[in-house]
Amino acid sequence: MSPAAASGPSRVRGPSTTTPAPAGLAARQAALAALTRVEEDGAWSNLAVPEAVADLRDPRDRAFAAHLAYETLRWEGTLDAALALVLSRPLAAVEPALRRVLRLGALQLLVSDVPARAAVDTSVQLARRSVPRGRSAGAGGFVNGVLRALDRRDGDLAWPDRGDDPVAHLALSTAHPSWVVEDLLERYGTTRTAAILAADDVAPGVTLRANADRDALLEELTAAGIDARPGALPVSIRAPGADPRTLAAVAEGRAVVQDEASMRVALATGASEGDRVLDLCAGPGGKTTHLAHLVGEKGQVTAVELHPHRARAIAEAAERQGVRVAVEEGDGRAPPVPDDARFEVVLLDAPCTGLGTGRRRPEVRWRRTPEDAAALARLQEQLLRAAARHVAPGGQLTYAVCTWTTAETTHVVDRFAPEAAAAGLTCTATTQLLPDADDTDGMFIATWQAV
Ligand SMILES: C[S@@+](CC[C@H](N)C(=O)[O-])C[C@H]1O[C@@H](n2cnc3c(N)ncnc32)[C@H](O)[C@@H]1O
């Protein structure tokens, strides 16, 4: 991380959360357990972290453990670059359990302002417990040496200069892979890209979709002591500190945990009372159920989903929310509906890299590659072609992906253009929602009207 930055902070700083007071080993152990689940099982942190910290009795311990886990996942690339400066072998050659301990320790030293002694001593203890007994002394000594060396280097860690190397500067200072930075730079230029990436590092609070009277739900939440206020949409509520697992309204299907970007997808379809809807990639049903509410009892919603467990989740969500949805397990490229079936509303909320959801599950940025984006774009195009065949005259086709890569957004629309024209579909809007300007997840939405 050289040379010293002219325009950035002089050392790693996590901008997204205030640092809770350090607790003891138990909080760090819980954070490490979450990191292990994310890395070893491929779990998503927005599920794995709340589970891993749930057994900590003190809420300050829970907050500290969650902070450590989320921020270690977010800052992975930058922490790895810092660790590489003091390791005598590649970080990839360090066994995974100790690599996680090193990242967690580095996070505390470089981002969280935990006193160095507490960060190093607890990391040594975690390292000793992470390996078989006969190797515990060696593991502890290794982690101790690396983290002490890193602490001594802390003063001279700096970002590359933004003017000299904007990609490396933004990648390291905002904790994103270079390919993501480069792709955004092409679309938005340096200033906007920096704002998008910075906003992607700020964990948002909980957002709810109200299925019935929003004001009544706001009153109910407020009466329960929850800080809840109207969101940007008529159906949305911002309840930043709420724990959705404890909300009766969520359990009873009167509210759904959903980002405003997802609500805007359902609204962008133009679905209205009595419409027939085909939702081609529907699991777990967040948008399907919203559409079912919009079309009401006179409408019909057919939800197609490839994976059986996600298809079941749609049916459960519909039942909980009291709406009717016909769930069909199948491949959206050859949807299990009659060839001649036509729908006023066709939604393709396609599988994608999901980079737009990085505020809540920061590891997504390190899990995805440009090759993933290219492969998914091919699948998205196939799905879009299948979706187009089922739009009724006068109906609308909507394509959505919770990402911002060029490959999966504007390129998909461009490549679909000749077929859209042949099918009598006119592109009416393309919108890229982004966390800086829209305060939502990153979401791309394109719509076509059928003649
Ligand atoms: C972005 S998610 C959809 C989210 C959903 N619309 C919601 O709002 O809850 C994409 C979904 O497509 C499903 N999927 C992936 N490939 C598919 C295919 N070929 N056909 C149908 N569904 C597919 C995935 O299992 C996943 O549930």
Image: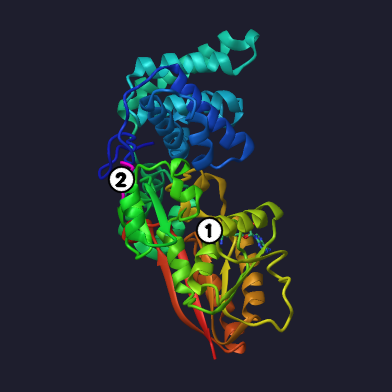
- Residue 227 magenta: yes
In terms of sequence position, does the residue under pointer 1 or pointer 2 come before the other? 2
Locate the N terminus by quadrant. top left
- The residue beneath circle 1 is 321
Point 48% across, 71% down: residue? 294
Residue 411 horizontal/vertical position (percent): 53, 71
The residue at the far left in this view is: 6
Residues at circles 1 and 2 in contact by the CB criterion of under 8 Å: no
Residue 214 horizontal/vertical position (percent): 36, 60
Residue 49 horizontal/vertical position (percent): 49, 35
Q: What stretch is highlighted in magenta?
A: 222-228
Q: Which of 316 and 384 is in front in this view?
A: 316
Residue 289 horizontal/vertical position (percent): 54, 63
- The residue beneath circle 2 is 223
| Camera sees residue 136 | yes
Lateral position of residue 296 relative to residue 391, left or right = left
Q: Distance between the residues labelled 1 and 2?
A: 22 Å
- Residue 401 magenta: no
Label 1: element kind: helix
Q: What crowding class fits label 1: few (fewer than 14 Cα within 10 Å), some (14-19), or many (20 or more)?
A: many
Q: Main secondary structure of the magenta part?
A: loop
The residue at the far bottom in this view is: 451
* Number of numbered callouts drawn: 2
Label 2: element kind: helix
In this rendering, the answer to whether 169 lies above or below 286 is above
Lateral position of residue 163 relative to residue 49, left or right = left
Q: Which of 109 and 359 is in front in this view?
A: 359
